[in-house]
Amino acid sequence: MSTLPLRLVAAAVLAAVAAATVLPSTATEASPAGPARVVPVFDGIERQVWNLQTPEGAPVAAQALVVLKPESITVRAHLGQDRVAGLETVESMGRRHLARGGVAAVNGGFWLSQPFGEPNSYFATGGQLVSEAETQGSLARGTFAVNGQGLPIVDRIDTSVTLRGDPGGTVAVTGVNRLNRNTRFPDGPDAVYLYTPHYGGSVTLPGPDHDAYRGEDRTVPITGLDVPASGTSAASGRVGAHGTSAGGAVAIPPDGALAVAYGTGRDQLRLALPEGAAATVSTDVIPVQRHWRADLWSAVAEGLAAGPLIVRDGQMTPPEGWEREGFAPETHSALRTPRSAAGVTPQGEVILATVDGRQPGHSAGMTMAELAHFMIRLGARDAISLDGGGSTTMVVDGLVTNRPSDAGNQPRPVSNALFLYHDYVFARTERLAGAQREETAAQIARAAYPDGADEVLIAAAGDFPDALAGGPL
């Protein structure tokens, strides 16, 4: 797809602010200290390096990965260490996924502590649900996703996860890949949970000495079950033998899932999933404000929630929405800190941005409003803020390209990240070598002409130009 629309937007904004070197103190965006420097990353991806200034004249260092060819670049969400409770730096993840085609990445969403590292709200990878949508506020969290047609979509979403048994019935799932909570947003005593191999090989359920203990549980293994990121599971699972415990480790079927229920949820699970029944899971993804058509969320392939939703239809969203998502101005959105963001242009181009901060002389960071206007400047029609602070990291070819703000400017281990993948398949290579240059030449000749050749060119081994001159011949 042409890069012209994005560059026209950037050029128009630059032209509009070129006359002003410092914006008024009431401004909601940082001014450019010069045009962006463009660094090619891979065919279809470029990295823009921006030198900006706060209204007070402090420097702001920002970068953006821009997908210029959506048809050949895909976006994937990855877990640290490929499991729920597995923090890992984006740099380490980048090196692991580079050989598979993951050439660039930024840090993803927030995480929680039960288990430590569990994605906070919606997370999906490879078409599978890892974490259901939830919020710490009164409004659903801003979420970035890619559906089955490769279309990037952004909205505030909620989810409803339901287990179905045949014969049997239905039971609502309270949480996916997390423990029972009794903190600020308690799950209650009758919750039903679902654990998948993304959690690990087993789950240690809370016992009487744990603050999440809810009494005796009912455990139900289901083999052959997949938990879709949205829609209904393609393959039916088979319900195994029911069990009960008062805490301790319980195995998760490596090719299925484990259902765990408490209180009245135990009877609901017993009736809905009798032993030997076929079982399916449905995940309904609900865009709560219907900005995008609901059907576009019916087959999510990859996605994660972070928040807040900061850009909609090319305009900054009202800050009161940020607070309703759980981001108070005095502790989060009004502070000038390192930031990360993900957005999509009207042409379907994905933008992943990072802003360094908390480093006087290098970069002061941005407020949430400044981040929103930066994403608009980059051409985003819709965008969400990602986790920021010491988590803000951009990686290209397995190397960190920004300056993280944690101690020693080292990347912070995070729960998850968003990766850009190319669809190229590279030819395999084989190294040919001998003890000396003559033997190396002989091995190359044998590999190139295993059945011999009618004509042979012999070059002197004592002086390299002789061999070079023979190449064209």
Image (cartoon, rainbow, N blue to C red):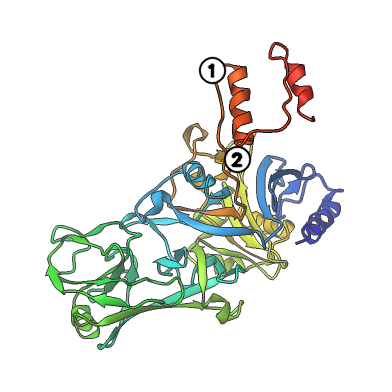
| Dot 1 crowding, Cα within 10 Å, few <14, some 14–19, many 20+ | few
Residue under numbered circle 2: 402
* Any part of residue 397 in sight: yes
Classify 387 as above or below 214: above
Three-letter residue code for mark 2: Asn
Q: CA distance from mark 2 to mark 1?
A: 44 Å
Three-letter residue code for mark 1: Ala
Viewer-proximal residue among 409 and 348: 348
**Placement of the C terminus among the 4 image quadrants:** top right
User: x, y percentage for residue 449?
Assistant: 64, 35
Residue 435 numbered mark, or none: 1
Classify 230 as above or below 145: below
Which secondary structure lies at badge 1? loop
- The residue shown at (20%, 83%) is 274
For the residues bearing labels 2 and 1, Cβ distance under 8 angstroms = no
**Placement of the N terminus among the 4 image quadrants:** bottom right
Classify 90 as above or below 462: below
Residue 34 numbered mark, or none: none
Viewer-proximal residue among 445 and 319: 445
Q: Quadrant of residue 193?
A: bottom left
- The residue shown at (73%, 12%) is 463
The reply, left or right, for residue 90 in relation to residue 427 is left
Which secondary structure lies at badge 2? loop
